[in-house]
């Protein structure tokens, strides 16, 4: 099936994503934001550069990527050169495993994906 989706970041991530190209910053709203929450498991305290918890930052990024991928409801709207999956295991404690696969033309250079 041919790819019929939109690859732009705001299509996948919504208004919680923005880019400041002047300062080379990608901005992702987290749970303490007034609106457009993107990293829903991450708070200001957990993301704090000197007192936060990197595990929370990494987990929130993985979950955000998985949810963005899953939200593209029809398989034809999902990028064919990228797949993201999640498995959940455990009864007393939950264990999340994320698998990301990216097909690249020349991975040693600037990212170049094959045609969708």
Image (cartoon, helix red, strand yellow):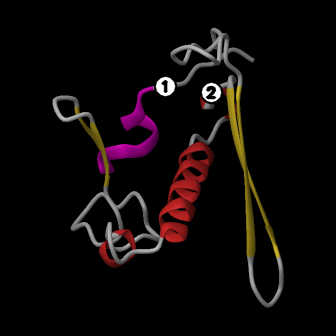
Q: Is residue 81 left or right of residue 72?
A: right
Residue at horizontal 32 percent and vertical 72 percent from the top: 50
Q: CA distance from mark 2 to mark 1?
A: 7 Å
Residue 113 percent across, percent down from the top left: 61, 15
Q: Which residue is mark 2?
A: 79
Q: Which mark is residue 83?
A: none
As drawn, the residue found furthest toward the left would be 22
Which range of residues does the magenta coloring cover?
8-17
Q: Is residue 10 above or below residue 112?
A: below
Q: Is residue 36 left or right of residue 9?
A: left
Q: Is residue 100 above or below residue 53?
A: above
In what element is the residue under mark 2? loop
Q: Is residue 92 above or below residue 30?
A: below
Q: Which residue is mark 1?
A: 7
Query: Which quadrant of the view contains residue 34?
Result: bottom left
Asked if labels 1 and 2 touch by Cβ distance under 8 angstroms, the answer is yes
Q: Residues within 10 Å of mark 2 (few under 14, many from 20)?
A: some
Residue at horizontal 54 percent and vertical 60 percent from the top: 58
Q: Residues within 10 Å of mark 1 (few under 14, many from 20)?
A: few
As drawn, the residue found furthest toward the front would be 50
Q: Earlier in the sequence, mark 2 or mark 1?
A: 1
Residue at horizontal 55 percent and vertical 69 percent from the top: 55
Residue 46 percent across, percent down from the top left: 39, 75
Pick the residue in front: 100 or 77: 100
Q: Is residue 77 left or right of residue 97?
A: left
Mainly helix, strand or loop, the magenta region? helix
């Amino acid at each position: 099936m041919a790819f019929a989706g939109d690859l732009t970041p705001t299509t996948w991530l919504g208004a919680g994503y923005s880019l400041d190209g002047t300062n080379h910053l990608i901005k992702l709203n987290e749970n303490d934001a007034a609106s457009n929450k993107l990293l829903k498991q991450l708070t200001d305290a957990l993301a704090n550069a000197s007192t936060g918890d990197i595990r929370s930052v990494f987990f929130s990024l993985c979950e955000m990527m998985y949810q963005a991928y899953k939200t593209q409801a029809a398989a034809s709207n999902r990028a064919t050169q990228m797949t993201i999956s999640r498995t959940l295991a455990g009864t007393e404690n939950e264990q999340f495993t994320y698998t990301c696969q990216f097909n690249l033309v020349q991975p040693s250079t600037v990212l170049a994906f094959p045609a969708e």
